Image (cartoon, rainbow, N blue to C red):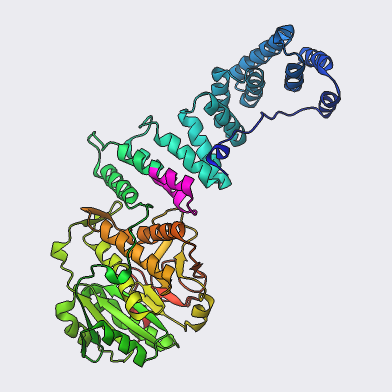
Amino acid sequence: MDGQNALAPEPAFATSADAMVSHMLAVENGPSALSLLRQLTEAGRLAEAAQCLPEVRRFYTDLHEVLGDIQTLADRALSQYHAHLAAQNLPEAAACLDILVQIAPGSTEFLQQAFKLSRTLEDFGKSVLYAQHLLLLDATHYDALEVMISSCERSGNTRGEAEYRLRLAALNGQRQHSVAQLYNICEGLNATLLNPLDDHTAGLVEQFLAAARAVPDSAEARSELYLGWEKHYRLTIEAIDVSPLARSTANLQPYPPILFMASTGRMMFRAEDLRSAAAQVGAEVVFFVAADEAYVQLYAKLYIFSVLKNSHVPCLVIVHIIGGAERIGAIATSIGIEDERLIYAADSFDPNLAQGRCYRPPPTGWCGLAAYYQSARFQWLGYFLEQLDLPMFVSDIDLLLQREVGDLLARCAAADVTFNENSDSRSYSSRLTANLLLVKPTVTGKRFADVLGQYLTRALQKDAIHYMIDQCAVLMARHIVAREASPRYGYFDTSVDINNLIYPDFRENPFRFLSLYHGFDLSTLGA
C-alpha cells in the first residue's frame, strides 16, 4: 500500500435505511427518487429521505430543479437537531447532523459539529468517517489527525499511522508542548521502524528526524520531570539512523590493543593463539560476553559454569573484561575456573576518558557509563567473528545456560543472524532485546557485525547517549543490512529459548537461556 492509499477516506456516510426504501431506490429512476424524497420528508422519515439524495443528485445535474426539496429536508433536519440538542437527546441530535452532513458534505460547520458530537457519544466509527472528511477540507485539523492515528493503531495500519503522525509533527507545536511533540515523533518512528523498510518508509524516518530537530527546547520554566522526559525522547530519537554505513571489513577496523589469557594463566599474545585454542578443543561455537570488572566478579563464574556444564557441543567461552588489561590475571584467578575451553580477553578502556554520559528516562536520569559497557560486546563482535570464523552466541554476562544448544544450532543453521525479538514491545528501542544474538561467520553475518560496531562507535562519541543505544543499534543494523542485501534472519523462540520476562528470583522455567536481569536475587540459585 502506498502512502496515498494509506490515507484514503471511506467513500460514504452510512445511515440506517428501511428495506423497502432501499429496494425502491435500487429500481427507480431520478424522478421517482425525488418523489420518494418528498414523501419521506413530509412523513418525518428524514434519515430515509436522505438516502434518496445520491440518485436525485445523479439524475438532476442542474440542482436548481431540486434545490427547494433539498432545502426543505435540510430545514427539517436542522430544526429537529436543535430540538433534540435542547432536550439533551444526543443520539437523535447526532442522527440529524448526519443528515445535514449528507446534504452539505462540504460544510465545515456541520462536519465539525457532527465530529464533536460523535466523540462525545464515543461513536468511534462515525468519528473516523467525519475525521476523514474534515481532513479533506483541512489537512491540519488537529483532532481529526488524532482520531485517524487511533484508527490506524486499532487496525494495525502502521504506515497510515506513521503518515498521520508526520502530519501532526508538521503542525509545529499547535496544541502540543515539546514533550508531546517528541512523544508523537517517537510513536511515528515506532510505527515505521518495527516493520521492514522500503524507500518510502525510510523517507518517512528521515522526515521524522527532521521534524524532531525542528522541535525547540522548552523555553518555559518547567519541572525537572518534564525536562527529564524531554531529554529521554530527544536521545531516543537521536539514536536512530537508517542511512547506509561505509563498507569495510571487520578485520580492518581500528580495534584498540587487546590481551588474551587462558584460564590457566598462560598469556596469549597473538590472534593465532586464540585460533589455536579453538582448534584444540574442536570448537563448533563461541559463547562471548563482555563486562566491566564489577559485573565480571558478580556474574562470570555463574555464566561460565552454566555454559561449560550444559552446552553439550564443543565450544570456546570468551569472557572479555572491559578496561581490565592491567588486572586480567588477578580477575581470572578470583573467578577460579580452569578449563581449556575458557579464554579471557581484556582491553584498556579508561572510563575517565569516555566522552559521553548515559541517560535513562525519569526518575533515573543520568546513569554513568552503562551504554559503553552494554555496547562493548557488539563493538568487538566483528573482530572475534573474523578471527575465529565460528558461529557466536553474544549475550549479556548475567545469563545462565540451562540446557544444550545443539538442537538450537541446527534449527538456526540457515540464518545469518538470529535475534531475540520481543514482539510484545511497541518501542523500537526494546523490540530487539540485546541480551542474546547468534551471529554466523557468513558474508552477511560479518557485514551485520561490521555495521553494528560502526554504528555504536559513532553513537558513543556523543556527549549524551540513550541507555538502550545497544538495542537501538541492533535494530538499525538489521534494517541497514536488509536494505543492502538479502539477509537470512532468524528469531529465537521466546517461549523456550530465552526469557523476556523479568524473574526476580529463581523458579522453575522452560528457558534454555535464563536472563537474570538487574536485581535478580542470586542467593536463590543455590550451590
Tell me the quadrant of the picture where the C terminus can be found. Answer: bottom left
Q: Is residue 464 left or right of residue 441?
A: left
Identify which residue is drawn at 45% across, 69% down.
Answer: 417
Say which residue appears at 46% left-offset and 83% top-offset: 403
The answer to whether residue 187 shows anywhere in this view is no
Asked if residue 292 lies left or right of residue 312, the reply is left
Q: Is residue 256 visible?
A: yes
Quadrant in which the N terminus appears: top right
Q: Position of residue 183 (x, y in %)?
A: 38, 43
> In the image, is residue 187 part of the stretch drawn in magenta?
yes
Name the foreground residue: 90 vs 258.
258
The range drawn in magenta is: 186-206
Residue 130, position in %: x, y?
A: 58, 28
Secondary structure predominantly adopted by residues drawn in magenta: helix
Q: Position of residue 148 (x, y in %)?
A: 53, 36
Based on the picture, tell me whether residue 257 belongs to the magenta stretch: no
Horizontal side of residue 485 vs 354, given as left or right: right
Tell me residue 194's x, y (percent).
Answer: 47, 54
514 sits left or right of 68 in the view: left
